[in-house]
Image (cartoon, rainbow, N blue to C red):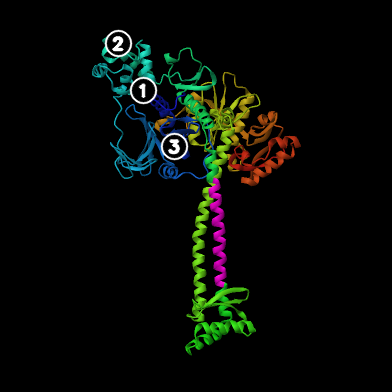
Amino acid sequence: MPKNEFTSFDVAAAVKELKELVISSRVNNIHQFDQKTLVFKLHKTNMPPVRLVVEAGRRIHSTVYAEESPAEPPAFCMTLRHYLRDSWFDSIEQYEFERIVILGFRTKTGLLRLVVELFSDGNFILVNPDGVIIHALFFKKMRDRNILRGEKFLFPPSTGKSPLKLAQSDLQVAFEASGDVEVVRVLARSIGFGGTYAEEILLQVDIEKTVLCKNLTHENIVNMFNVLQALLSCLLEGKFDSCIIVDADDNEAYLDVVPLRLRRYEGRVTKCFQTFNEALDEFFLKVRTTEKALVSVEVDKLQSEQKRLKRMVDDQTKALAEEEAKSERDKTIGNTIYAHFNMFEDFLNKLVAANQHRVEWSNIFAQVLADKAAGKVPEVYVEGVDAKNLVVNFFVDDLRFGLNLRLSIFDNANEYYERGKRSKQKSTGTIAALETSKRKLLKIEQELAEAEHIRSLKPAEMLEALAKRKIEAKEWYEKFRHFTTSEGFLVVAGKDVVTNDILIKKYTLQEDVVFHAEITGSPFVVIKAEGKPITDKALNEAGEYAAAFCRAWRENVGSADVYWVKVDQLTKSGPSGESIPHGAFFVVGKRNWMRNTPLKTAVGVIVDGEIAYFTGGSIEAVRAKAKSYVVIVPGDYQGKDLLKMVLKTIMLKLSKEDKEKLGKTSIEQIREFIPYTKGTISQKHS
């Protein structure tokens, strides 16, 4: 059986790595993919986006797979978005070496905590700064605590003493007090180390796990404590050697995922990873996909429910049509009575008057029927009589209806109007019930289609489909503006004060060259030497790029002065203690000037085999690689008007085959290559 959930040691290892990854990131969004699985989309200025997956009762780790979000987020997800979206990820901690993780978020209303329970059925509990429960995935009452809205949150009772707080004497006392209990049980439960690592400790000290505690020697306990401390030392220092253990009988099946090499798995086939989170992501992707594919789906039950709901929808649709028809018919009868008001009033008055002269109703009705048979008017409209209820039935204007002799003509008409209103009200309720039934039917049909699809798929096919949704890690320079010179040098430029600062401090080496224009609002532009001597041609192309993206372009200036220096000439300490703004540096020593550098840049299309894509940069760099390109200089066209002009001009120079490779092209793909999205196409250079 493959591993199904985290151990306390796994939680500690995953959290250790996640601290650097998620703390101080911003919560862009939250998704809920099934009842127990949340994904936090996080963003850090100097790092690629992070996706943190948390499954209650099971796991927590970063993921590089982007599952398709549900069309309608569940209510719990919407609540979390309300409280946590746009907050700052403040902390992530394991509680007392238990399978509990506390996520801290800095929000406008204070520090909120999301307690993630990874044991048993699991839970998510959102807690306010006062420790009171705001919301939870599952509300419940328990013997030792309650998870209820508005109540103080309490952690569950500890399953044992934390290994991090354990002294050798504590271990000695625990074994002495356990007597006839097997040693593995005490290590796993009383000390809270979990079965896997309890067995690993015993394996390393060569003690059978079935040995009773009373039979342990002092030396045995000392050796166990030393191994325990060695494991904890690796954990605390983050010295992991993470791997997935592969099933020897099936190389496609995974059995376990561990942050450290364990003796119990010596000689087994393993798959190694740089981080424990990467290993967890790969392991649980495959295990959950396999589970999903192999699980016995109750298709028959779903089909039965689908048939029941279809019948209900048909019945409600029919009932609605009948109610609407009845409402309209009763309204029309009321109108017809008023249209023939005088005729009906004269006729009924004659009948009532006869009764008042002591003529029995039976005789009156007999006379009405006799007059009808004789074809007299208005008896020609009479269809029959209901002597018991004193109702005369008429057929007028293709309508059959009765008039009650106990009511006036006005009251008879009003009675039909009221019936129509009641039918209308009833149809409103039927519409609501019908809409509910339709929603349920749609949901069942979707579940049924998914279930039938899952049953038809093999795990390998499902994994292949998911693999296509893997988010490939971007190169560090893709966070900045960049291009490659005609000679292959990477040139990277900041986009704003923040990226300017990061580019110089984090990514620029002594061998690199840094450009800047002699005007406020210029980006830093860096040529990455990467062990090669930087040529004059590369300097010219990078200088052209630095000039193009400075503020002079926005002012429609034709040229700008640009200089380059080495990175050790840049400092944050200004002369005489002057402060240097964020994203700016003070230059020490000689500047290498490139006076009157013309402002121009190029945008083109590169065709590589069966694909085509846009590129931008210096004219020489784009000319060397592009099938078609244009040169842009400062000008008055801007925004989408300029982008459309550039796209049209480039496309005119491409063959039909290359245009097809480019596919349906968005003008937005060109925007990043044009300074300030402003300028004009240079006829001279193009």
Within the image, what quadrant is residue 450 found in? Answer: top right
Examine the residues drawn in magenta and state their main secondary structure: helix
Identify whether 177 is placed above or below 443: above
Left or right of 261? Residue 623 is right
Few, some or many residues within 10 Å of mark 2 (<14, 14–19, 20+): some
The quarter of the rendered structure image containing the C terminus is top right
Percent coordinates x, y for residue 78 in the rendering: 44, 45
Few, some or many residues within 10 Å of mark 1 (<14, 14–19, 20+): many
| Mark drawn on residue 194 | 1
Q: What is the three-letter code of the residue carrying label 1?
A: Gly
Identify whether 431 is placed above or below 190: below
Q: What residue range appears in magenta?
A: 306-331
**The magenta stretch spans residue 308:** yes
**The magenta stretch spans residue 116:** no
* Residue 283 in sight: yes
Front position in the image: 475 or 9? 9
Q: What is the three-letter code of the residue carrying label 2?
A: Asn
Residue named by callout 3: 36
Percent coordinates x, y for residue 327 in the rendering: 54, 67
| Mark drawn on residue 543 | none
Q: CA distance from mark 3 to mark 2?
A: 42 Å
* Residue 378 in sight: no
Q: CA distance from mark 1 to mark 3?
A: 23 Å
Percent coordinates x, y for residue 546 in the rendering: 58, 33
Of label 1 and label 3, which has the lower sequence position? 3
Q: CA distance from mark 2 to mark 1?
A: 19 Å
Identify whether 486 is placed above or below 388: above
Residue named by callout 2: 220
Q: What is the three-letter code of the residue carrying label 3?
A: Lys
